[in-house]
Image (cartoon, coloured by chain):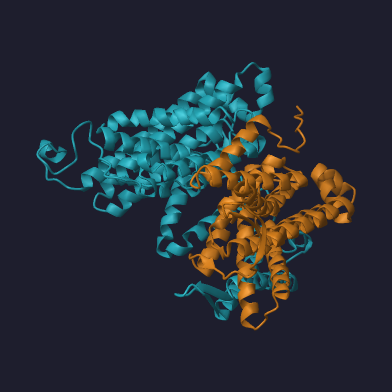
Amino acid sequence: MDYFAQQLINGLVLGSIYGLIAIGYTMVYGIVGMINFAHGDIFMIGGFIALITFLILVSIGLTAVPVILLLVLLVSMAITSLYGWTIERIAYRPLRHSFRLAPMLSAIGMSFVLTNFSQVAQGARVKPVPPIITGGYTLHEGADGFAVRLSNIQIIVVITTIVLLALFTWLVARTRLGRDMRACEQDQTMASLLGVDVDRTISMTFVIGAALAAVAGMMYLLYYGLVDFFMGFVAGIKAFTAAVLGGIGSLPGAMLGGLLIGLIETLWAAYFSTEYKDVAAFSILIVVLIFLPTGLLGRPEVEKV
Amino acid sequence: MAANASQAKTARGPDAAFILKKAVISALVALVLFSLMIGIRTEAGSDGQLTWWTRFGDLAAMVAVVFGGSIVMELLRRWWGPVDTVRVVPPSAQKVFSFAGRALVPALLIFTFLVPVIFYDERYILDLGILVLTYVMLGWGLNVVVGLAGLLDLGYVAFYAVGAYSYALLATNFGLSFWICLPLAGILAAFFGVLLGFPVLRLRGDYLAIVTLAFGEIIRLVIINWQTLTGGPNGVSGIPRPTMFGIPLTPGDDGLAALLGIEFSPTHRIVFLFYLILALALLTNWVTIRLRRLPIGRAWEALREDEVACRALGINTTTTKLTAFATGAMFGGFAGAFFATRQGFISPESFTFHESALVLAIVVLGGMGSQLGVALAALAMIGGFELFRGLEQFRMLVFGGAMVLLMIWRPRGLIGHRAPTVFLERNTVISSDLVKEGHG
């Protein structure tokens, strides 16, 4: 039971990271109707920028951990969202009214560009960082000596995710930008007729998605203590799986899907085999799409002739 | 960085201040983007600690490149005119074009047949030719699924892998010859195609794409992890070379050279492989062309255009989709078996998502459904790839960038029109803007 509880905690933390990435997929899909293949790589770029900022801050003599974390978070979010904005501008906007495959291929190309950009710019080797946040709590110690632990990093990851999710839900539900986004999601032409700046709204969607991916990248760095140039691909596919599982276009769905994928992956690795944990995650995707093509919280798509 | 692209259309004439402003904005964006990623370099030292140093020279160079590039791009755009300008081609030039268009296919075919004769001593060109033809074949195979049936498949490499591993394992474990394994590899790949097809029957468009991608990854992960069967990451080595219908291409007494009474040369095998993949590719092409004239081929194209209408007309969409997957997969399997016998060694590294994306890029660049377009696109892509062989590190960067640029430049591919399979009185080409795709 203790072992299970521990895996549950680990899975929820991993799931929070997936959920943060999945929100970016689900928003872009909801509004533009394309799979932003480069989103996983945006997450990776976010991780790299967090790492570099952290190194610089440490070497100029900052020691207060909360200050460092806050600065790293802000810098990483700012620069990564500029990446999101630029990519939309270069690779997707010219293709917005093109046929459906074109932006997708453009996105795949962009994903290759980002992966190899960071490989060339920062080298192919894994970048480790020493643990920044240490310590934690022992929740329960079993008779056999197995202790259920909750580390401070895990608490930070979960709390950050909850705060961001709340902030984001507020943004979509209550602000002008959120209303514009929902309008564009329903009907871009109509929205633009009613005075919504569609281009700007779509740009902002990419910026927000990239900012959340940057947070996910930073959390990944804190939690696992490493980044490498290839981590975006698999994380990207899993986050997309999460978005589909939760019902694409639905924000709570993306988070729920992320948590489920994180849990499934962790539990599978814990009880069956580590080698096949990715296979398990992808199989879940296929199974879900067969039985629940609209995901858990998605709206069914009505086909009009 | 197309900042202010909308303003560019309203501005008249080469407004220097505007171009400069745009270039400065692009350079500023680039400065922020690259500041940390290029300006700072990190590396793990020998003690496991990360060290970093600055590279402001590189950063300045990159920003300057973006600044200059932005100016050049903007000037080019003004020179070229708006994207959707209709260019009037004079009738005489049109005649020349249409003649060249008709002569192109036979000319290319004859040239391809003569490649081993012309370049007999140039091993490098022969190898490159084999590589290009392999991708032509893969492109034609995927074209059945994506171009004809409109089913977006991002996991085509799975079938390539199945074909390669079936041949490799059957040949190394049971000593079966290439000519027995080739159909078996095709059948096995087709079986996997149906296996993938069944669950995705109800999916369309992007969902289909992501499931096929997941399928491709599952196959690769299983190959990596099922070590007892596939050798895992180490792959399968010692795969037998093909024989010319039982006659080995070796220097021994029973070899082809000895039988013909000519001097042995290792080039014979390369030439044989060249004609083998050419034959396989042409077979793919021929079958596809013939299938397009059969009810099943027409059903594929109808499915691509409108699935609902298809069903209303009584076409069985289940069998239509499954046959498309199976046919495409079978050709992928053939190509895989050929790949295994050519390399003599295969490992999961050859079957990554990157291959699927490359083949899909070839099909889309070729114009989705155009056989000639796919062949030309394969030549352009693989040939272009070879040009950057010297820049090993930057190859994928260039490839990704080229994919983005090509999509922006010609989203409809090189050959952007289709010849209808059925017509009433006269055969006219249809602009592919009028054709739906990838919706099935």
Q: Where is residue B41 in the image (x, y as percent from the top left)?
A: 54, 74
**In the rendered view, does A253 fall on the left or right side of B298?**
right
- Of the chain colours in the picture, the one used for chain A is orange
Occupied quadrant, residue B20: bottom right
Task: Identify the residue shown where x is 11% and y is 41%.
Answer: B252
Task: Identify the residue shown where x is 63% and y is 31%.
Answer: A290
Occupied quadrant, residue A150: bottom right
User: Image height check: is A210 above or below B242?
Assistant: below
**In the rendered view, does B274 fall on the left or right side of B224?**
left
Please identify the quadrant where the C terminus of chain B is shown: top right
Q: Where is residue B324 in the image (x, y as percent from the top left)?
A: 52, 28
In the foreground, A175 or A204: A175
Q: Where is residue B62 in the image (x, y as percent from the top left)?
A: 58, 73
User: Image height check: is B50 above or below B436?
Assistant: below
Q: Where is residue A165 in the image (x, y as percent from the top left)?
A: 78, 54
In the foreground, B148 or A139: A139
Chain ID, cyan in image: B
Occupied quadrant, residue B255: top left
Q: How many marks?
A: 0
Task: Identify the residue shown where x is 64% and y is 28%.
Answer: B202
